[in-house]
Amino acid sequence: MSSVTDRAYSGEADFMAVRQFLIDSYAAFGGMFNWGGERWEIVRFSGNAACELAVDRPLERFVRIWESDGRIVGVAHPESGGDLFVEIHPDYRYLEDRMFAWAEQNRSPAPRPDTPFSTWTTDGDPVRERVLERRGWTRIGLTGHMRRRSMSDLPPNGPVADGYMIRSVDLSREEDSEGRAAVSRSAFGHNRTGELMKELARAPGYRPDLDLAAIAADGTVAAYTTLWWDEVHRYVIFEPVGTHEQHRRRGLAFAVMAEGLRRARALGAETAYVGSGAGAPSNHLYESLGFTEVVDDVRWDAPAP
């Protein structure tokens, strides 16, 4: 095997190269082990654009790339600061100890001083667990799930609540971006504006026909979801799914996701994914939509520097 080198992340070419590495790794692992390319895009065009990483701690300073013969085989990076994600090719898992060593010495600053430096593992991954244990990380416990369903069947069509309709939205349009921002603030507590939501429309994988919303009679966005389509591996992932607090308990999230599943199947999707928090009420929604195959995510905290 050829030697492996590591280097700093730099610019648009690296953004696209890492995105492609993540897309390719789906086939290399035979499923969702690393991030999908869509999550990498969301960080770039949504999270980072919204200054969740402040100007004194930009994303690029805390991304490191490992290469073999000029081909990416591993990436260490944050998502929102004070956290770490290690993406790896299955043939190069021996690099993980080296990657965590670098990240421990180059920790991305957290949004709050008391936030621990954390990473996450897929439950039951002994390779990553042994690395973390050996390096003194502490297993905190279950924090979330990646849910999966086959597209061989679909949930039944249900009526949309009176006074609402389901349609595509386009974040490049001000009326849609402002409405989506309002739901994001209500559902997730994000400090989003319409202008910042427009940034997501610049992501390579963003498709307005897969950005769906429940629209109230007065034209306001009541609930929404965005689907990200991987045409190579024939899967979609729902990210995010949210309902405004003034429009909850009307089945709107179910309705927009059911429409998303129908559109995904028409594209030829074979699998659908959605992430959820451990114990979150949304788990009941996702189970009702057939997302019953579950892989758990476990949080680990780093030792003090």
Image (tube, rainbow, N blue to C red):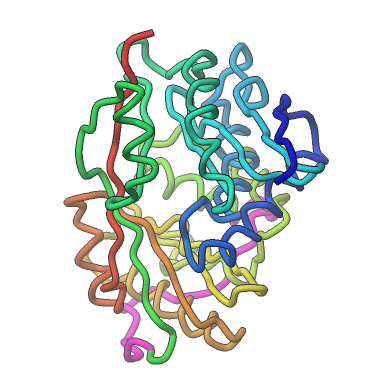
Regarding residue 245, the answer to whether it shows in the image is no
Residue shown at 31% from the left, 79% from the top: 162
Task: Provide the residue span drawn in magenta.
Answer: 154-176
Please tell me whether residue 265 is drawn above or below residue 295 in the rendered image: below
Instruction: Answer with left or right where residue 294 lies relative to residue 49.
Output: left
Furthest residue toward front: 1
In the figure, is residue 251 to the left or right of 89? left
The image shows residue 237 at horizontal and vertical percentages of 49, 65
Between 8 and 45, the one lying in front of the other is 8
Q: Is residue 241 above or below residue 53?
A: below
* Residue at image coords 59%, 56%: 176
The x and y percentages for residue 130 are 33, 37
Question: Vertical placement of 114 versus 259: above or below?
Answer: above
What kind of secondary structure does the magenta stretch mostly adopt?
Answer: loop
Is residue 259 in view from this perspective? yes
Horizontal side of residue 60 vs 288, given as left or right = right
Q: Residue at x 33, y 10 (%)?
A: 304
Q: Residue 163: within the magenta?
A: yes
Q: Residue at x 61, y 11 (%)?
A: 56
Image quarter of residue 66: top right
270 is within the stretch colored magenta? no
Quarter holding residue 18: top right
- 257, 294: nearer the viewer: 294
Q: How many marks?
A: 0
